[in-house]
Amino acid sequence: MAIAEPTNNSPSYIDKLVVPGDVVLDLSSMSNQTIKLGGGLRQDCDSITAMKAGMLRFSKPNKYWVESSQKRYVPSAGDAVLGIVVDTKAENFLIDIKGPALAYLPVLAFEGGTRRNIPKFEVGTLIYVRVVKANIGMNPDLSCMDASGKAAEFGPLKDGYMFETSTGLSRMLLSSPACPVLEALGKKLSFEIAVGLNGRVWVNAAAPSTVILVSNAIMNSETLTSVQQKLMVDKLLQRTQ
Amino acid sequence: MEQRLSNTWRMTINEKKFIKTSLLADLRVDGRRPFDYRRLIIKFGSEDGSSEVQLGQTHVMGVVTSQLVQPYRDRPNEGTLSIYTEFSPMADPSFEAGRPGESAVELGRIIDRGLRESMAVDTESLCVVTGKLVWSIRIDIHILDNGGNLVDAANIAALAALSTFRRPECTLGGEDGQELIVHPPEVREPVPLIIHHLPIAVTFGFIGEENIVVIDPTYFEEAVMGGSMTATLNTNGDVCAIQKAGGVGVLPSVIMQCLRLASVKAGDITNIIKNAVKSFNTERSLRKIKRHNSSVIDVSETAQKVDVKFSTNHVNRLKLSEDSRVAQGNGMEVDGQISQKEGTSKRDSSAKSFIGGPSSWDPHSKGIDPDALRASFASRVVLAPTEKLEDSKVDEPTDIEPNQPIVDDNSYISPKEATNTKSKTNEEKTLIDAIKPKHRRRRKASSQH
């Protein structure tokens, strides 16, 4: 009796756990509506099924994706990530974005990029990029511009410290009511932070001690509740001052 | 190729630079000071002789096992200690399965040097029968996660596993008093190893142009450092081993400073290990009490019966009398020859004097009359069924076919020991080989039967 229920009101899946094979949405029931699919979802004719276990998320106009926490990043179009330059080719930079394959960053995918002014990146440079294309079986394509062709914060990151976390933690850091750790840290310290959805986090501040404190606080916060996070940050700040 | 590229871990310029610059301010990226050790956690498995060590992110498992083997010729009364390392690709993508890399070999060597060459484990107490049977202790080190400073973690894992390891008690018994009985742990309490001291490895890294010294480098620091030094010390402050890796040069004064630091850290780590072992042992004895209560066996009364039963079921039985002949073979051959020529009856006593000593090899190098040698082998066959070596029979070896005699001693020995005996006979063969190759061929043929 209860089994037949979910198919009717499929939106109930939002913010619930889904496992691979779950039919998350039925397109036949929601005609003339455009939706955008993020990572972990695929379309089979009229049904949208989950491809991995995690939480189904929905963001206001029409975006759906499955969120989970893992070490390896599965590229999906539209994600902002932190990449490391591995090699330079004539047409592309090869970038490591923690995915199953290296990603290509075309040398012209910079604001005002022409053949004349190709940027020079040393191997090991950290850059903040956006995933443009992520098709299965192909190397993902990256870009250092937003959709309108502006540089918009994308580009190489200088100095600071980069560390790796899980993809879940990086999503938590990016959540819209600012994450409790960052909020607590931001009240007392001033620092710069760049979070990639691939689980890489870059932190920069004037003093190295601040960078170390912030990065360790973030790394420790993974399994803590918001109250615990605040307590932890307070304790860390007390110890250093 | 590209797949490999995407799987390898790489470090950004930012990280490298940051690690170096923050060290100038006496700070390390994980919040430690340069001379702080990471948090050390030692856990033990349910069985004796297995340990799991966590040093920050680094995760190492140590397992100790033992086996009865034939000792080395030059050390007839000493057991052996060997160390094997396994670097799982799970720990670090740069490790290849089944192919020990440079770091795997180096790690094994450092631990080996610290443990074996400082005589930390009493090998003489591992002897069961001189020249014939000793315990061989094998330490397996599995790297489960590489978070840097594998050497120290692996060393601690090895020590922790060794300190909790217990080998089964064994006695000589049986009808002729020459049979080896290995008592299962239910019957007799296994005995712990005798460990004289704990050699603790402490690793230092030298980072940047200024060669800033850090203790217990992490994975990231290892990627940046120009060189490292591992000092192995015990609580008494004895330096057991030093290993200096990497190209960077270090001042003698820095080395002395490192050694002083290391001796302090070695004391701390020894305490941690000892406390962990102590709590494990109390827990173990508590468990044992429970086991005895529940067990049906009344130890005091049926001890003898149980002994016999187990020895037939799953206990190594070794006909030591047979085995001994193989081991002493070379000494005795020569002896037989002497007794034939001189007609004296010193065989028993001289056989003893020949055991294991290098002097027993000398007659071979001088070259012996092959017929006499064959005869001496034959004499051994005659003697085989009897316990004591009787000289009266040695006098008439000519009755026996000279071709058939070289004994198939393997057949008397339990299959478990067969491999050891094989190596044993190999050794013999090569030496006899030096005298007469033809003889070896015949011998081989006979042993294959």
Image (cartoon, rainbow, N blue to C red):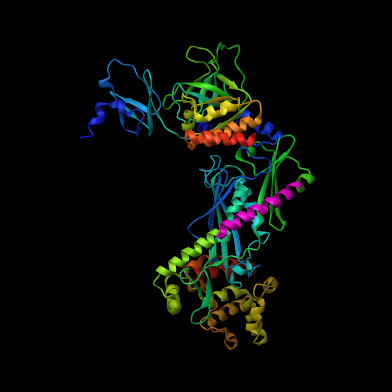
Extent of the magenta region: B257-278
Q: Position of residue A225 (x, y in %)?
A: 47, 35
In this rendering, is residue B351 above or below B267? below
**Which residue is depicted at the point 74% across and 34% down?**
B209
Q: Position of residue B210 (x, y in %)?
A: 75, 35
**Which residue is depicted at the point 65% across and 30% down?**
A208
Q: Nearer the viewer, residue B61 or B84?
A: B61
**Which residue is depicted at the point 56% across and 40% down?**
B94
Q: Quadrant of residue B130?
A: bottom right
Q: Position of residue A77 (x, y in %)?
A: 44, 22
Q: Nearer the viewer, residue A15 or B406?
A: A15
In this rendering, is residue A78 above or below A231? above
Q: Nearer the viewer, residue B364 or B403?
A: B364
In this rendering, is residue B130 above or below A144? below
Give the residue at the far bottom of this rendering.
Answer: B392
Residue B310 horizontal side relative to residue A155, left or right: left
Q: Nearer the viewer, residue A128 or B268?
A: B268
Q: Is residue B390 found inside the magenta-colored segment of the image?
A: no
Main SS of the magenta part reads helix
Regarding residue A56, the answer to whether it shows in the image is yes
Regarding residue B403, the answer to whether it shows in the image is no
Q: Quadrant of residue B358?
A: bottom right
**Which residue is depicted at the point 62% across and 83% down?**
B348
Q: Position of residue A216 (x, y in %)?
A: 57, 35
Residue B267 horizontal side relative to residue A34, left or right: right
